[in-house]
Image (cartoon, grey):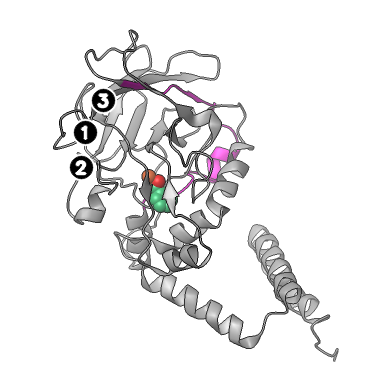
Amino acid sequence: MRELTPETITDAVLDQMATTPDARMREVMAAAVRHLHAFAREVKLTPGEWIRGIEFMTAVGGMCTPERQEFILLSDTLGLSALVNGLHDSTAVEDGTHTSLLGPFYRETSPRLAAGSQIARTVKPGSECALYGRVTDVNGRPLANASVSIWQTGADGLYDIQESAASTDYRGVFATDADGVYMLRTVKPVGYSIPMDGPVGGMVKAQARHGMRPAHIHFLVGAPGYRELVTALYLRDDPHLADDVVFGSSGDLAVDLDANDPGCPIKGLPSIRFDMRLSREGAADKTSGRVGSDPAAIVKSRAGTGNGQSPAAAPAAS
Ligand code: BEZ
Ligand code: FE
């Protein structure tokens, strides 16, 4: 029998796992082991530090509920979600609008609303704005009847479900018209802090990071025959556009709040225009599916009440 040492242990583990029948699982797990072992060797990880790491991940898991997905937050703050999104974009057959983070506050249960509806239940004077744009293919041809799901925070920087698990506010699903246009009323998006009261917040504070996201509005857009798009618009003048704590903001997704856009179909309000281009569906879309998931569905799938997956572009129930 070979002697197990810090130099030989990695190959011993890889040899044992080589029996994994599923080829993709074999590939992913072998790479994970190689990199985890290399990490431990590089930093000369001590037993006490590894127990601290295990305690941290245990606390992250313990924080997860249908309303709060601390593991997604961890992935986001480590830049892993943004990296996976970028890798996903590179498998598209056409260069459409780029992906941005789904984040932990998307919910499949969002009301379908008529074009032009206000998605906020209460609107403080001066905070209302119009949001509109065109959904097209990469050649600018309009996609009619595309599903456009939108969610954002209120003026206090909190999502509805952070205020109350049962509330639905600042979110809705719209359909594009024959010209691919969607339009709605909302409130001006604000920058906000990610939840800092859990283990991930503790990590962010220990790293002396600010924890802020720039002002943004989330989108999940689907049309038959096209790759589903999970993205967000970002306000260009936000001071944290360039140092988003979760690495979601990007110059190509930055837009302006326009005080007087003559092209806006909703008159009398400051407006934001955000056009999106969808790539045609390709082979990668048959298996990889959505970039992210309704976090509540992940927790429910653990409890055996669902599979944690959602059909591409399925608009939510009313
Ligand atoms: C969000 O934009 O909703 C979000 C994304 C990542 C972490 C926290 C919040
Ligand atoms: Fe957000």
Q: Are marks 3 and 2 in contact (CB under 8 Å)?
A: no
The mark nearer the N terminus, 3 or 2, is 3
Q: Position of residue 181 (x, y in %)?
A: 35, 17
What residue sits 50% from the left and 14% below the top?
140
What residue sits 58% from the left and 32% below the top?
282
Residue labelled with disc 1? 119
Q: Are marks 1 and 2 in contact (CB under 8 Å)?
A: yes
Residue 291 placement, left or right of 180: right
- Against 192, residue 37 (above or below) is below
The residue closer to the viewer here, 42 or 174, is: 42
Task: Measure the alpha-carbon separation of dots 3 and 2.
Answer: 16 Å
- Against 304, residue 264 (above or below) is above
Residue 129: give its label: 3
Quadrant of the snapshot with the N terminus: bottom right
The amino acid sitting under disc 3 is Cys
Q: Position of residue 178 (x, y in %)?
A: 34, 12
- Against 264, residue 310 (above or below) is below
User: Which range is magenta?
Assistant: 271-294
Q: Is residue 193 visible?
A: yes
Mark 2 sits near ligand 2, with its Cβ under 8 Å away? no
Q: Position of residue 273 (x, y in %)?
A: 38, 20
Q: Is residue 293 visible?
A: no
Mark 3 sits near ligand 2, with its Cβ under 8 Å away? no
Quadrant of the snapshot with the C terminus: top left
The mark nearer the N terminus, 1 or 2, is 1
Residue labelled with disc 2? 169
Task: Measure the alpha-carbon separation of dots 3 and 1.
Answer: 11 Å
Residue 281: give its label: none
The mark nearer the N terminus, 3 or 1, is 1
> Magenta span has 107?
no
The amino acid sitting under disc 1 is Ile
The 10 Å Cα crowd at callout 2, few under 14, some 14 to 19, many 20 or more, is some
